[in-house]
Structure formats: C-alpha cells, structure tokens
Amino acid sequence: MFEFKVIAKCPVTGARAGEFFTPHGIIKTPVFMPVGTLATVKAMSPQELEEINAQIILGNTYHLFLRPGAEIFNETGGLHNFMNWQHPILTDSGGFQVFSLAKLQKISDENVICRSHIDGAELIMSPEWSMKMQGALKSDIAMAFDQCCEFPATHEKAEEALKRTTLWAKRSQEFFNAHNDLNAQTLFGIVQGSVYEDLRERSAQEITGMNFSGYGIGGLSVGEPHDVMYKILDLLNNLMPQNKPRYLMGVGYPLNVVEGITRGVDMFDCVLPTRNGRTGTLFTHTGRINIKSKIYEHDFTSVDPECDCYLCKNFTRAYLRHLYRCGEILAMRLCSWHNLRFSIRIAEEARENIIAGTFPEYLKNFKAKFHDDNNSEN
C-alpha cells in the first residue's frame, strides 16, 4: 500500500521528483505540507485546501491528545473522518512539543513526564503512548517518538538525545508493528544529532538501519544559521537511502525549502505560512513583504502577479492593507490562503523543473529574485 518512487533526479544538484503512494492518494514530491495542529489548518476549510492543491496535511499528536482526546478519534474512526479530509495526513510524534511547549519535569530513557501547557495536568509520554495515539488518529504517516535538542546544545547533550532517539525509535517500531494496521498506516524514523556532523552521521546509520518507510530530519530550523542547516543536509544527502522519502521537519521559509529540495529533501512542513499570514507578512516571488506598510496604501497591483491564488487573482495590495488596518478577519484569511498556496507552488515549480531537466536554472532564478523587504509597519 505504501511505495515511494523517484521518477526524476537533477544530475547537477541531486534534487528529486517522486511519487509516494498512500491509502488516501499519491503524494507528488517535492511537497509542502500545511500544518493542521488541532485538526484544522488555521483560517482554511478543507475545500479551500483542496483548491490550493494541498496534497497532504499534518496533525499534532500532543495537541489532539489533550483536545479532543483519543476516545473521540476511536469513536469517529480517525482524524480523516473527524475533520472531513479524505487525503493523506501525517501526524508528528509529540516529541517536539515536549521540547518546545510543555513544562518538562523529567525525561528518562523510559518516558517523559511533563505538564500540559493548557491546564498544568501531569502527562506521561513515551514511544508506546505516541504510537497508540497515532494509531487512534489513523494518519497515513506516523512519526517515531524522538528527543529534539535546543540550539545551541553541547555535544554531550546532543549525544544523549541521539541515544534516546535511537532507543525510542526501536520501541516505537516494535509497538507500531505489533498493534497497527501496516496496510493503512506507515511509520517514519527521525534522524537527530543537532549541528554535529559525527552525531548526524551516527544517527543516520542507526535510524536508517531500522528500515523505516521514510525518514524525518529533526532538530533543524531551531535557531541555527541557514548555512549550518545546509551543511547538515549536504551530509545527510549522501547517507540516507535513495529509495525512501526524506522529510525536513518544521522548515517552511521559502529559501530554506528550495535549498532543501536542492539537497534531496522530498517533504516539508511549517506553521510559517499561516502564522505570518495572520500578521500581514506575505511571501512573493520577489521576496517577503509586510502588507501593513504605508507604502501599499495606494498600491492597486496584485500581491504577486506570478501567483494563481484567490487573493492575487481578485484583490489589490491597497485593499488588503485596508482590511488589516480595520481589523477585518478576511485579511488574515486571504494572507494565509496566499502564503499556503505560495509554499505549495514552490514545491510544484521545483518538481516541474526537476522533471523538465531545468532545475539548476530554476534554482538560480529563484535565489536571484527572492529577497526580504523590511518595511516598517504603519
């Protein structure tokens, strides 16, 4: 039921175009995956996600465990039915929320004891807990429970997290294989190791040796410089299996996505498109703009003439700025809509150029055009 095929590869850069077959459809890679933390992509309906050609979305195991809880998903038959999204879904393991959100009390090889960010209730999280919850969610792709490091982290701390990630990957895989329908759901392992090349190489060897269906690259985009991220991706490009999908977790800044594709990454996710959209920051083919800036007050052009989204085909920068200044909800919806479509389209354009054999030219042109516009908010 699950199969990944590389159908084209750039001989210059190693960028790949592929197809990942799942029970809920074929995912054409490279792909950007919108984040639906609480069984919804913020400001977007499932129908609108289909209109912008979202192939796959994410759900968050930790958040959905807290609200509405596993019982609801057992009753409804999983996350697809609950939110009426009949396309592929990937669920994260909950491990990143231990690192970023929950109040940590104790972490050991056995489990994680922390407190809910909502009400302070004590939570006990483990690989088995994560697999059981993701089994209730019935996502197409589940992620192994892992430990993510903060940046900067000492080599000692990063190695400790690596050892635990490997241990938890084994336990995740054992529980998953024993309790889940392997024809309906598959499991990805996660490579950790912070910014240390020796640890990344070791983690890649240990995790890929377990023969997961795909591999996440975790612990990046947590504060390290972009060139450091690219150095780690260059290293992993030569260490990870060519016949399995590679998922760069939590990365969504356009330049990072394109650079990741250049280094053989197939899948990306991030909350950045909707988070930025809610505050008026938009991505365009010529760079990032803040639509609340006064310079757009009399700008009756499209946000991005190269974009095919609903916003860009129907409204002007001046109108969008007006909506923000008036506090209209539509402003946040339109900007989120545009940013998501822009992120999805980057992957689509890269794929088209990989298949056509023109990816190096696409890469050069994208990097030459895309820049940041640091307009002040007025």
Image (cartoon, rainbow, N blue to C red):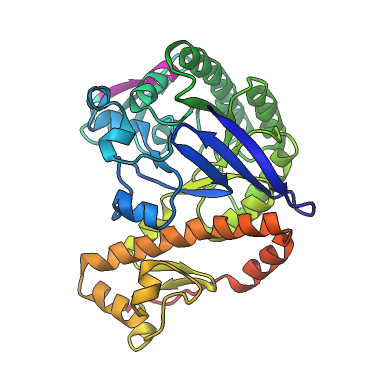
| Residue ranking furthest to the right | 11
What range is drawn magenta here? Answer: 122-129
Tell me the quarter of the picture where residue 240 sits.
top right
Residue in view at x 64 percent, y 67 percent = 367
Count of number-bearing discs = 0
Residue 280: image x %, image y %? Answer: 35, 68
User: Can I make out residue 117 in this image?
Assistant: no
| Residue ranking furthest to the bottom | 298
Residue 336: image x %, image y %? Answer: 35, 60
Q: Is residue 350 above or below residue 80?
A: below
Residue 376: image x %, image y %? Answer: 39, 77
Position of 183 with respect to 198 (left or right) is left
Q: Is residue 298 above or below residue 138?
A: below
- The quadrant of the picture occupied by the C terminus is bottom left
Residue in view at x 49 percent, y 75 percent = 373
Residue in view at x 42 percent, y 17 percent = 111
Residue 1: image x %, image y %? Answer: 53, 27
Tell me the quarter of the picture where residue 98 sits.
top left
Q: Is residue 339 above or below residue 5?
A: below
User: Can I make out residue 80 in this image?
Assistant: yes
- Residue nearest the viewer, comparing 159 with 80: 80
Residue in view at x 42 percent, y 62 percent = 339
- Membership of 295 in magenta stretch: no
